[in-house]
Image (cartoon, rainbow, N blue to C red):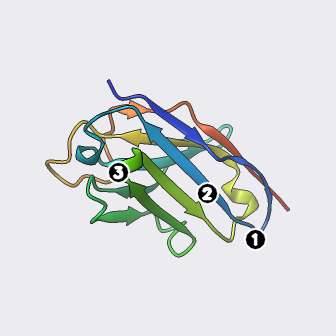
Amino acid sequence: QVQLVESGGGLVQAGGSLRLSCAASTRTFSSHPVGWFRQAPGKEREFLAAISGSGGRTDYANSVKGRFTISRDNARNTVYLQMNSLKPEDTAVYYCAARRDGINWYPRGPYDYWGQGTQVTVSS
């Protein structure tokens, strides 16, 4: 089992920036692709971004391209989501998720391990 813990959420004004972190508990972190998702109240969970185990490949949802950047530091067992130009519509609980293996590149999933989420609120 891989334990994932998100952090870095909070309240920010529209147009501002926030950096989320996803810390993992595994010794084989570089073998796990990681994705970021979000879910607003009453809405379906939405894919945002994914990164391969080595960090060499990324994928983004159209809604966040050019605004969000996913990265990872395998030495720290951490994946980041840099969020710029935030909008009120970005308000949601943000989750990171890890896939068991990176044999094939399936950035949208499925994912096997999920964090508990961190709240991001963007005020207008």
Q: Is residue 46 visible?
A: no
Badge number at residue 112: none
Disc 3 marks a residue whose amino acid type is Asn
Q: Position of residue 115 (x, y in %)?
A: 49, 33
Which of the two labelled residues, at mark 3 and mark 1, occupies the earlier sequence position? Answer: 1
Q: Which of labels 3 and 1 is toward the front?
A: 3
Q: Which of labels 2 and 1 is toward the front?
A: 2
- Image quadrant occupied by the N terminus: top left
Which of the two labelled residues, at mark 2 and mark 3, occupies the earlier sequence position? Answer: 2
**Outermost residue toward the bottom in this view:** 66
Q: Position of residue 35 (x, y in %)?
A: 40, 49
Give left or right: position of 31 versus 50. left
Give left or right: position of 7 versus 4. right
The reply to whether dot 2 and dot 1 touch (C-beta < 8 Å) is no
Residue at image point 28% right, 35% down:
27
Q: CA distance from mark 2 to mark 1?
A: 14 Å
Q: Which residue is mark 1?
A: 15
Disc 1 marks a residue whose amino acid type is Gly
Residue 44 vertical position relative to residue 59 in the rendered view, above or below: above
Q: Which residue is mark 3?
A: 74
Disc 2 marks a residue whose amino acid type is Arg
For mark 2, give the secondary structure. Answer: strand
Indicate the quadrant where residue 42 lies: top right
Q: Which of labels 2 and 3 is toward the front?
A: 3
Give left or right: position of 89 versus 68. right
Badge number at residue 19: 2
Q: Position of residue 56 (x, y in %)?
A: 27, 65
